[in-house]
Every structure is written in C-alpha cells, then in structure tokens.
Amino acid sequence: MFDITAPIYNDADKAREHLESIHWPHGPNCPHCGNVDAARIKRMEGKSTRPGVYKCNDCRKPFSVTVGTVFERSHIPLNKWVLASHLMAASKKGMSAHQLHRMLGVTYKTAWFMAHRIREAMKEDVASSGPIGGEGKTVEADETYIGKRETPRKLARGRVPTYTKSGKSGGAQKRIVVGLVERGGKARMFHLNDATKDTVRDVLVRNTDRASILYTDESRLYTETGTEFAQHRTVKHSAKEYARREGDVVVHSNTIENVFSVFKRGMVGVYQHCGEAHLHRYLAEFDFRYNRRTALGIGDAERASDLLRNARDKRLTYRRIGEAGHA
Ligand SMILES: [Zn+2]
C-alpha cells in the first residue's frame, strides 16, 4: 500500500510536480500547439501568477499540466485529485463516493463527481489500443446480468427491452453486460441496452482479433458470429460443464467468470447502486484495474501513475455528467 501522508497527497504544489514528471518526463509540452521544445517554453513567474503556469513561445498561450486532463478547471486542490486517483487505482473492489468524501475531506457531491472523472481517465482508448486476442490467442466472451433496469424515463435513452437469456424463459429486467477477455491478457466489458445476435456481434468483432480462438457458452447469441473467428469452442453451462478436456486443451470460460465476479463483488459490496447511464464508467474502472493486475507484474505505484498519465485528453464537464443524473 502507499503512504497517505506523502507530500503529493497533501501539498498541491508537490502533486502538480508529480503530475508534471509523469506527463512531461522531458520538460513541458504545449497542449495548445503541440510544441515539445522545452527551450521554447518558459515558466511564468511573478506575484500575480500561480505556480505551475508556463507560456509557449510559439503560440504565445499560457498553460499548466492540467490543461487537457480530467482535472482541468477544477477548484479541488490537485493533491486531492492525486490521492483519489491513487485510492481508486489501488482498491480492488473500487472506492465509494462516501469513502472518498471521508478520506479527502470534500463534500459527498464533490467526491461523487471526482470519482466519475477519474473513471473517465480509466477508460481505455480502444481506437489506439486495437482489438484484443490474435493468432493462437484465446478470447472468452460471455454476458452477465446485474441490477435492475431503469424505466425509460429514468434511463433517458431508448426503451427497456424485454429479452430472454438463451436457455431461460422469461427474463427479469436486468442490466446487460457483455465481457471479453484474452486469457493472460486484457478484458473489456460493455453495457448493452439489448443483447441480440447483432449487438453482441458488434461488440465482438470491434474488439476481438478474428484470428483468435473464441470461447463462449452455447448461447445462440454467439453461434453465427463464432464462425467468423479462427475457431469457436463452446462450454455447456446448462449441463454444469464448466470445464472439459478436448484433446490436449481444456475448454472453459473461467477467466471471464473471474472478471465478472470481481466486478459484481465491487458493484454489490462497494457501489451498491449506480445509475444505469453511468454503468459504462464503472465497467471502465474494473477493466482498468484488471488490465493492470498484480498477476501481470504491475504494482500499485505503476497502476496509479498509469491512471494519472491516462487523465489527458478526456475532459468531462460537470454538465455532461449532470445531464445523465446522479447515481
Ligand atoms: Zn504553443
């Protein structure tokens, strides 16, 4: 664990310097024009200037390290942002806004807002990281159902669909999450309004390299899409066949079960309730930690630095969160 009394958690200047060392290992870069020549950037000094402000010689604009990050234009001291980020990066099941509110000495509303901004920083940039899996790699896909669906008025987008999970009749009105995980690699979870062959295919083909070996249960959701992958193997969940041997390979979907189980323990034990419109951010939070898990040789400090590094170019305004309603 980390030392909560460390200067970066208690002093805004130290926190800013910490952020600068992560974002600018070779000196300040101008976020306005992209100038990376530290010799053409000068620190602004003077009684009326707050510390950490630089001016670019090329575009003549002032900036600080928080420009273009989720911390931009925040009145919350940067050391509290750094502490909140480190706490959320380190806690396996997540950290509630109530816990943050007590630990940071900010209001509950502020803590709630900070947590959502930090989740925004945890979001993987799928376009730049590309699909998971690949030739000879195994990707498990499955759906899980969590919490209660909200009424269309509360959900504010789309209708509440009636769906039937393959093999079950009826179907409670629960929220649908589709998860993908590469064995020994990364996971990605998605909230779907509707789980159909097409919506599930869309998630699968956008996020999984088709040279992968795909493992799913026998749900009809995957039958057709499975043929688009190098191989498609199925596990019979209905027959309680969670693992079976096929030649020298064991067919199972334990990896995705584990990803879902950590997520569900966090949602039930820590978050208890989240607005459905915010579910995608919680999924991003659990993906972030899973993809930087200890088993991959990533420690708390590295995971936390990675989070602060990812805080760039993902501005989320209070209005955008506010519009979707409070969780
Ligand atoms: Zn510039």
Image: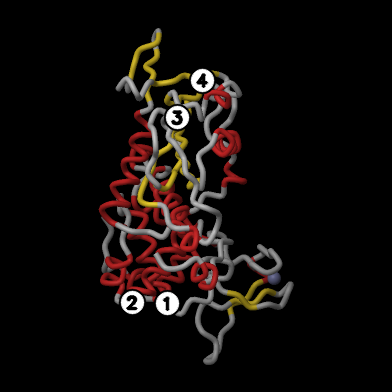
**N-terminal of the two: label 2 or label 3?**
2
Disc 1 packing (10 Å; few <14; some 14–19; many ≥20): some
Q: Is mark 2 within 8 Å of ligand 1?
A: no
Q: Are marks 2 and 1 in contact (CB under 8 Å)?
A: yes
Q: SS of the residue at dot 1?
A: loop
Q: Residue at 26%, 69% (x, y): give it.
A: 5
Tell me which residue sits at (41%, 52%) in the image: 149
Q: Of the residues tagged 2 and 3, which is closer to the observer?
A: 3
Of label 1 and label 3, which has the lower sequence position? 1
In the image, 62: left or right of 292? right
Q: Residue furthest right?
A: 58
Disc 1 + disc 4, Cβ < 8 Å: no
Q: What number is the disc on residue 76? A: 1
- The residue tagged 4 is 232
Using the image, tell me which numbered label, if any, was put on residue 140.
Answer: 3
The mark tally for this picture is: 4
The colour scheme used here is: secondary structure
> Does the residue at mark 3 contact the one at mark 4 (Cβ under 8 Å)?
no
Q: Earlier in the sequence, mark 2 or mark 1?
A: 1
Q: Quadrant of the N terminus?
A: bottom left
Residue sitting farthest toward the bottom: 47
Q: Which corner quadrant holds the C terminus? A: bottom left
Q: Quadrant of ligand 1?
A: bottom right
